[in-house]
Image (cartoon, rainbow, N blue to C red):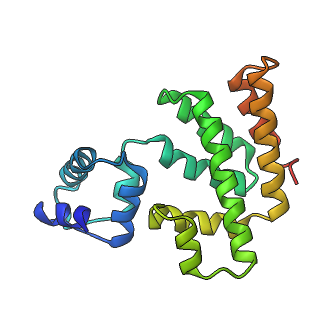
Amino acid sequence: PWVIKGFQSLKKSVSLEAAQYLVAVSEPDMYTLKNEILKISTYADDKDEITLDDIKLLVTPTIKSVIFDLLNAVSEKNAPKALRLLDDMIAIKEPEQKILSMLSKQTGEILKLKILIKNGASQQEINNYFKGKHPYALRIMTEQAKQMEEKYLQDMLKACMEAETSYKKGFIDVRLALEVLLSKLQVVS
């Protein structure tokens, strides 16, 4: 609601979905959100309505926003796309260790969500389990959980742990560990 009001104060309208996306992919502070709202509104000067595409085009990428895209590439078993997204994250100066950690964490959360759905958990039970998770992020995770098989998620999580162990023991550079992990997406079954 705060984001929608922010756009309205600048004589712009925005859908709930677009506002939720902005909150989900931005840094979680009002100062950053206010600046993003101003930037997007200035860009869309002659338009009355801000679209989700406008926001996707203009929002400064954070690791949170790119991790959603990376996990979509993982769910599609699209190694070339996943490797391009990895390069994008490294280009915005995200530490490789943080990328691997977030990929492992999100894969584990999607696996938990997959199991909850499989076991017939209600939306309320899922919301309680993921308390504090932004509704947009939870919706994306649900879509990803529905696209991926449980075994694939288990194998992917195992591959993440192996990549982390390999780089922590000094067997492989962390970037190479990530590249190897993402290169074998089609092989992980």
Q: Is residue 71 visible?
A: yes
Q: Nearer the viewer, residue 134 or 62?
A: 134
Q: Position of residue 173 (x, y in %)?
A: 73, 19
Relative to 86, say whether 148 is above or below.
below
Picture quarter with the C terminus: bottom right
Q: Nearer the viewer, residue 97 or 70?
A: 97
Q: Residue furthest top?
A: 170
Relative to 146, say whether 54 is above or below.
above
Tally the marks. Answer: 0
Q: Position of residue 10 (x, y in %)?
A: 12, 60
Identity of the residue drawn at 76% across and 53% down? 77
- 158 relative position to 85: left or right: right
Q: Position of residue 119 (x, y in %)?
A: 75, 78
Q: Position of residue 99 (x, y in %)?
A: 60, 36
Picture quarter with the N terminus: bottom left
Identity of the residue drawn at 48% across and 48% down? 65
- 95 relative position to 145: left or right: left
- 98 relative position to 167: left or right: left
- 122 relative position to 66: left or right: right
Relative to 104, say whether 95 is above or below.
above
* The quadrant where residue 24 appears: bottom left
Q: Nearer the viewer, residue 137 or 131?
A: 131
Q: Is residue 84 visible?
A: no
